[in-house]
Amino acid sequence: MIERVLDGRTVCICAGSGGVGKTTTAAAIGLGMAARGRRVAVLTIDPARRLADALGLTELGNEARLVDAGAEGELWALTLDAKRTFDELVELHAPDAATRDAVLGNRIYQELSRAVAGSQEYMAMEKLYDLHHEGGFDLLVLDTPPTRSALDFLDAPADLTAFIDSRTFRVLTAPTRFGMRLFGRGGGLALSALERATGVRLLQDLSEFFTSFGTMSEGFRRRADAVDRLLAGDDTSFVLVTAPRRDAVEEAIFFRERLDEAGMPFGGVVANRVHAIPAEATAAGLAGPLGEELARRVEADLGDQRRLSERDRRTLAALRRLLSGRPMIQIPELDRDVHDLDGLRALEPHLFGGAA
Amino acid sequence: MATLLDRRLVFVTGKGGVGKTVVAAALGLLAARAGRRAVVCELSGQQRLAGVLPGHGGGGPDLISIDAETARRDWLRRELRSGALAGILGRSRAFDLLTAAAPGLSELLTIGKVWDLVDGGEPGRAAYELAIVDGPSTGQALALLEAPHTYAGVARAGPVHSRSLLIEDFLVDRARTAVVAVALPEEMPVNETIQLAASLASLGASLELVALNGMLPRRYREEEAALMRGLEESLPGGERAAVRVALAGHERSRDQHREAKRLRAGVAARVATLPFLFEPELRMAELEVLADRLAEAAA
């Protein structure tokens, strides 16, 4: 089933809102494909500790590590260090060592690379592009960052390009008259009032930043364009990961529409933790073996579970209408939480087909 | 120690999808019923509460949605004391980038807006006695709570500096501010909650209460589960399926209790358990059930 979602593509991006099991799904897809003989790398952002331990990801690092999964193929995993990736990009694009050091040491740059919304998303895409470009893997699976909105990362390359757009940079790289040029006359006044109010020397930091960063903007922009092309191209498949919760489904629907607008390839949906009970389940003949009182409780239990199944079915129905012929894979609520390789293997029959 | 609803700020956070909004709503309902002038602040911009809570007229709390952009515009207008200047900056793309690049400024403005609602330096004249914040997930929540401290260090003088200090004092004062974490009785959310408690402690703030959401009913005793397990294979198909459903639920419930125990051992905060709701939609009746449970823990 998931193989239909992947459709032979070499880049799989798992997207969805927080708490729907993106990391777990990405890892399970990776493990399953490795078991089918592929050489797979899973890129995670912030894996829960035990899952990270299971994948051998005990520390942040931009180097992929081979997971001891006993698979026929190979499963590699890496936890993205956004700051490190950004630094590497600066090193790549800097024309000389002085510019590189000026950027890396600038406070605006440090904030931008660490804290600004979107930079982590962009760096995830950047690392993905890098690995794709190197070409050492049959499949790359990306677990997207836990953003406030699952969509932020789609805009990330464009946002960063806009930020370092050379037109902006041209206006900004006149250090002495920075404020005036940036905002016009009134704006310049406002900005110096703002500096007085905040007590922060933003002007100087910003102007330094743009002066040195600007020399690299062309390289960054070409890179961001290339990342954009990868996301929209024939190598990529977006998997929407969701759960039968109203907020998660609404987010997935929104995302589904955005993918079409952005011309990015929708592979299918993985819905995690769906309540389902076998249609044949009945407590009718249990009073004999279990006693009447216990049988009644089992019957009440079944009634609650049926209501949950019905609720989940209705919650997912709106998303089902938007599949455009692509699959929706439902993973049932399992008896145990998933946080190790055995747990991931328990997901495999549901993801890959062959589940009872 | 003051009870939860006697504070000025109750900040609700937790991992994605654990039920933060519902807990914030239930706390808002409790506060309004206790006669507090209370407001529930949504920071997500999703405005999911309007459909669930009764409005002010129906005995519910007020609702307000705070987004970083509006917070920034209001602040500019006040700091620059000029609508025209603020307008120029507020529309500027460059200013967007500048506020984004100033460390912690967006967060400071957002939490500052909440602070204005209940304190603003003159608590007696504040619009509300209590603000309940339906906060973001743990990482972003910590950034919000940490922002005044960060910013007090970045801005070495000026009105922003002194305001940051006031807000920081307010946030770490247990008599005025309480942090409530919402968790599910599962391994990952419990781990995250234990980490949150440690991170809050290092900020000087403290975790007051954990709302452990989605606790399944314990339907069967161990000997009953054992009886079912023993009979499982001998039953006809439909009955066997039913018993398997029952046993799976039993296992889940047992795991949940183990996680609840681990949580209690891992945090000093009180833990309130909230029942898993089987109803298809969250309505007032369900909210009342949760509010009642929280009322016991909040006392």
Image (spheres, coloured by chain):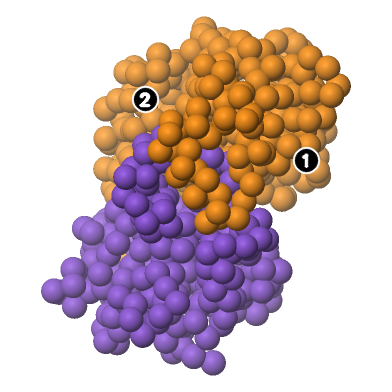
Looking at numbered disc 2 in the image, what kind of residue is underneath it?
Arg
Location of residue B101 by image quarter: top right
Q: Give the residue displayed 40% in from the left and 22% down from the top.
A: A259
Q: Nearer the viewer, residue A33 or A211?
A: A211
Q: Residue furthest toward the right?
A: A97
Q: Give the residue displayed 23% in from the left and 59% down from the top.
A: B50
Q: Chain of mark 2?
A: A
Q: Position of residue B80 (x, y in %)?
A: 41, 53
**Residue that carries the numbered disc 2 in the rendered image:** A258
Looking at numbered disc 1 in the image, what kind of residue is underneath it?
Leu
Query: Quick one: SS at disc 2?
Result: helix
Task: Give the chain ID for the purple colour.
Answer: B
Residue A55 against residue B16 in the figure, above or below? above
Location of residue A130 by image quarter: top right
Query: Quick one: SS at disc 1?
Result: loop
Q: Residue furthest toward the left?
A: B57
Q: Give the residue displayed 36% in from the left and 85% down from the top.
A: B124
Q: Give the residue displayed 66% in from the left and 60% down from the top.
A: B156
Query: Sequence order check: which comes first, mark 2 or mark 1?
Result: 1
- Crowding at label 1, few (<14), some or many (≥20) Cα neighbours within 10 Å? some
Q: Position of residue A155 (x, y in %)?
A: 47, 26
Q: CA distance from mark 2 to mark 1?
A: 31 Å
Q: Position of residue A189 (x, y in %)?
A: 46, 42
Res. A60 mark? 1
Q: Is residue A17 visible?
A: no
Lateral position of residue A259 relative to residue A115, left or right: left
Residue B99 against residue A207 in the figure, above or below? below
The colour applied to the residues of chain A in this rendering is: orange
Q: Nearer the viewer, residue B201 or A183?
A: A183
- Crowding at label 2, few (<14), some or many (≥20) Cα neighbours within 10 Å? some
